[in-house]
Image (cartoon, rainbow, N blue to C red):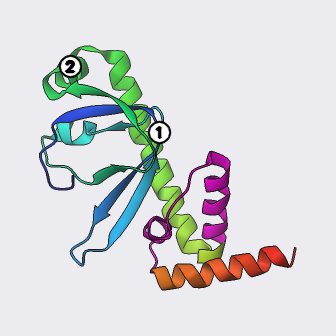
Amino acid sequence: MQHDKVSRVMLLKEGIAKCFFTEENDKDYIVEFLGKGEIVGEIESIRGTTCLCTIEAITNVEVYALSLSYFSALIKTDLKLNNLLLDVFAQRIVHTSSRASYQQLYTIEHSLSRLLALQAQQAVAITKEDMAAYLGVTIRSLNRALKTVQENDGHR
């Protein structure tokens, strides 16, 4: 949970979860959807801070949970793990930068079309609330965009 003390570092074995901030105005913003192989809690563990985001399962999720002391010992002694973490951090920076520029340069409808395609490809149902939170728009704006996308798909 956002602002709570991290209790474990977790590696997703199966399933999909959402990683989101709740802003001061009580609106959620989904930073990313997490899947198999993703790690959570490592930044907070390394930095000794409270949780940056809330992680919530959207499908059945299985995780490997590591105690903070075990994770700390591993990063002090395991060069392979450190290299994997550096790769994860680099991938996140690239993904976040790419997503931010994409959302600035393209319409909501275009981003929504990509999200709907990803949803179909992964065979997972994403609620309208989560779609809006991921795209950084209101439900009303999402509904307008959904209508436009459906109209455009009907004309193809």
Q: Residue at x 52, y 84 (%)?
A: 141
Secondary structure predominantly adopted by residues drawn in magenta: helix
Relative to 78, is 140 above or below? below
Q: Residue at x 34, y 58 (%)?
A: 20
Q: Which is more foreground, mark 1 or mark 2?
A: 1
Q: Can residue 107 be seen in this view?
A: no
- Report x, y in % for residue 107: 62, 77
Q: Please report whichever mark, 1 or 2, sits nearer to the chain's N-terminal start.
A: 1
Q: Is residue 63 left or right of residue 51?
A: right
Pick the front one: 50 or 95? 50
Q: Magenta segment range?
A: 110-138
Relative to 134, is 87 above or below? above
Q: Can residue 29 be seen in this view?
A: yes
Callout 2, which amino acid? Lys
Q: In this view, does 10 lie to the left or right of 149?
A: left
Q: How crowded is mark 1: few (under 14 residues within 10 Å), some or many (20 or more)?
A: some
